[in-house]
């Protein structure tokens, strides 16, 4: 099946989703719906051993479409966006991201939610949402569990962008490689998992997640409620989003 904004293949136990929405792979509802359709088709595939997210174009992803955070579109956007992570969680197999260039906002959340991340040394990684008056729900759920509370709250509250080396030191990514070697290094990075039993991989990942004693769905539901029912009803959230679209500095009223 062909898609407008992505490419998808399933071969030899590896499902690959390639972001392909030029120029910077901004994730809009249509694109995320396509990703969800692919993941739906892979749920229950007994021979699926890993899923790889990669990209074409200038960068991995500059984030989620800010315009679709507005008004009546916001609940639809959150449903499509969080649908990707719910489906990845349901797959129960290793998920891998291969990133380069800008990996920001929702693009960063997609990458770091993956179990394993390999990044080019030119990667710029971060969650700048706070600067436009919102917060990153998936990062709020997953980042403290990956890198600890203090590192996560600094990244999310500051909105700062870090390079691949710092991301590696923090534990946000597993490996940093030269940009011109990313494709080959990604293939080598993925290869060991494709030699293993799909069922054993699923059971092992399930056990590791159980060891964290953390249920993804209940915590994400609480975060969604805060985002849609509290944050998006504030004047500053609307001001920040409008200011971004209008290319001006936001005028905060702290309400």
Image (cartoon, grey):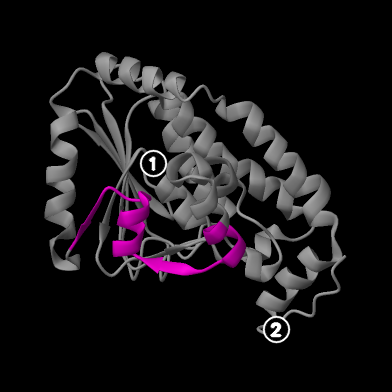
Q: Mark 2 points at which residue?
A: 249
Q: Residue furthest bottom?
A: 248
Q: Which of 225 and 45 is in front in this view?
A: 225
* Tally of numbered tags: 2
Answer whether residue 12 is visible to the viewer in this image.
Answer: no
Q: Residue 173 colored magenta?
A: yes
Residue 133 coordinates in the image, percent (x, y): 71, 66
Mark 2 is surrounded, within 10 Å at the Cα level, by few (under 14), some (14 to 19) or many (20 or more) other residues, namely: few
Q: Mark 1 points at which residue?
A: 114
Name the residue at 69% across, 41% down: 223
Q: Residue furthest front?
A: 150
Q: Of the residues under marks 2 and 1, which one precedes in the sequence?
A: 1
Mark 1 is surrounded, within 10 Å at the Cα level, by few (under 14), some (14 to 19) or many (20 or more) other residues, namely: many
Residue 164 coordinates in the image, percent (x, y): 31, 63
In the drawing, does residue 193 fall left or right of residue 153? left
Q: Residue 243 colored magenta?
A: no
Residue 63 coordinates in the image, percent (x, y): 51, 61
Q: What stretch is highlighted in magenta?
A: 154-177
Residue 75 coordinates in the image, percent (x, y): 73, 46
The relative height of residue 106 versus residue 90 in the rendered view (above or below) is: below
Q: Nearer the viewer, residue 94 or 140?
A: 140
Q: Do the residues labelled 2 and 1 touch (CB within 8 Å)?
A: no
For the C terminus, the quadrant is bottom right
């Amino acid at each position: 099946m062909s898609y407008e904004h992505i490419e998808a293949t399933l071969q030899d136990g590896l499902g690959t989703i390639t972001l392909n929405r030029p120029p910077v792979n901004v994730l809009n509802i249509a694109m995320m719906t396509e990703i969800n359709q692919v993941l739906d088709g892979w749920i229950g595939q007994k021979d699926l051993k890993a899923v790889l997210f990669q990209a074409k174009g200038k960068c991995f992803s500059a984030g989620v479409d800010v315009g679709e955070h507005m008004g009546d579109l916001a609940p639809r956007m959150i449903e499509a966006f969080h649908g990707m992570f719910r489906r990845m969680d349901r797959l129960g197999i290793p998920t891998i991201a291969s990133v380069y260039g800008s990996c920001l906002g929702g693009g960063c959340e997609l990458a770091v939610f993956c179990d394993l991340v390999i990044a080019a040394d030119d990667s710029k990684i971060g969650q700048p949402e706070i600067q436009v008056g919102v917060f990153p729900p998936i990062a709020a759920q997953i980042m403290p569990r990956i890198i600890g509370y203090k590192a996560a709250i600094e990244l999310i509250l500051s909105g700062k962008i870090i390079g691949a080396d710092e991301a590696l030191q923090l534990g946000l990514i597993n490996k940093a490689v030269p940009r011109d070697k990313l494709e080959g290094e990604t293939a080598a990075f993925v290869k060991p998992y494709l030699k293993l039993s799909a069922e054993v991989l699923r059971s092992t990942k399930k056990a590791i997640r159980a060891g964290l004693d953390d249920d993804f769905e209940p915590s994400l539901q609480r975060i969604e409620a805060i985002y849609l029912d509290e944050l998006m009803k504030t004047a500053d959230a609307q001001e920040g989003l409008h200011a971004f679209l209008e290319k001006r500095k936001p005028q905060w009223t702290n309400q």
